Amino acid sequence: AQPGGVGDVVLWGRSMGAVTSLLVASTREPDVKALVLDSAFASLKSLSLDVVRRGANGVPTFLARGALRWIRGSVRDAADFDIFDVDALRHAPECDAAAFFICAADDNFVEPSHGAAHHAAVATDLKEMCVCPGAHNTTRPRQCYARVERFLTRVLDGEDLPEVEAHRDPEAD
């Protein structure tokens, strides 16, 4: 960092915070060096449809989509905001920051497939994914945090960067 300036920026977020971090790194702040994204959902639309699909047995998809359109219109009218704009997966290919993805194997809110989709979509080759036991709000195991620490150390120190994605610690999975 330059005197009086900011050094390397790392954003770490969980759930909506992870989505926000990815959106900031993709669309607003190209100087983000690395991201740690825990349980980032692909888009608010896909998350909403997943929740309805899992929780509303027997509700036809067309009704769920209709309800979501109604909610979208209501929010747009009341807040001048389109909930479908919360789409991190659409912007993930614009992200070239190193990225570490965390998800929980039994997450019944943000399914692990959302994290896998982000991992595949980001523009960087400096990426790693850790699938942990537990659910959405389960405390992540120490092994996962140790992997994050090793990843960030390598990224921030510029060490062994081509090997970052290949590194996996089976104990944390």
Image: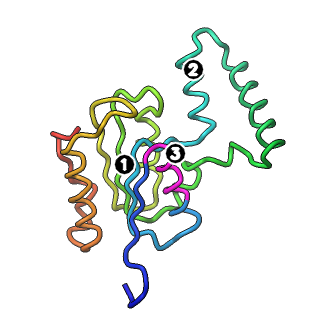
Q: Residues within 10 Å of mark 3 (few under 14, many from 20)?
A: some
Identify the residue at horizontal 18%, vertical 45% (top origin).
143
Q: Which residues are magenta?
A: 14-23
The residue to which callout 3 is attached is 16
Q: Amino acid at mark 1?
A: Phe
Question: Which percent across, then down, holds residue 110?
Answer: 47, 34
Badges 1 and 3: C-beta atoms under 8 Å apart? Answer: no
Query: Is residue 14 depicted above or below 32 in this figure?
Result: above
How far, Cα to Cα, is label 2 from label 3?
Answer: 20 Å
The quadrant the N terminus occupies is bottom left
Identify the residue at horizontal 43%, vertical 85% (top origin).
5
Identify the residue at horizontal 50%, vertical 56% (top origin).
22
Q: Residue furthest right?
A: 77
Q: Residue furthest top?
A: 58
Identify the residue at horizontal 55%, vertical 25% (top origin).
51
| Res. 36 mark | none
Lower sequence index among marks 2 and 1:
2
How far, Cα to Cα, is label 2 from label 1?
Answer: 24 Å
How far, Cα to Cα, is label 1 from label 3?
Answer: 14 Å
Q: Nearer the viewer, mark 1 or mark 3?
A: 3
Query: Is residue 151 depicted above or below 111 in this figure?
Result: below
The residue to which callout 1 is attached is 101
Question: Which percent across, then down, holds residue 77?
Answer: 84, 42
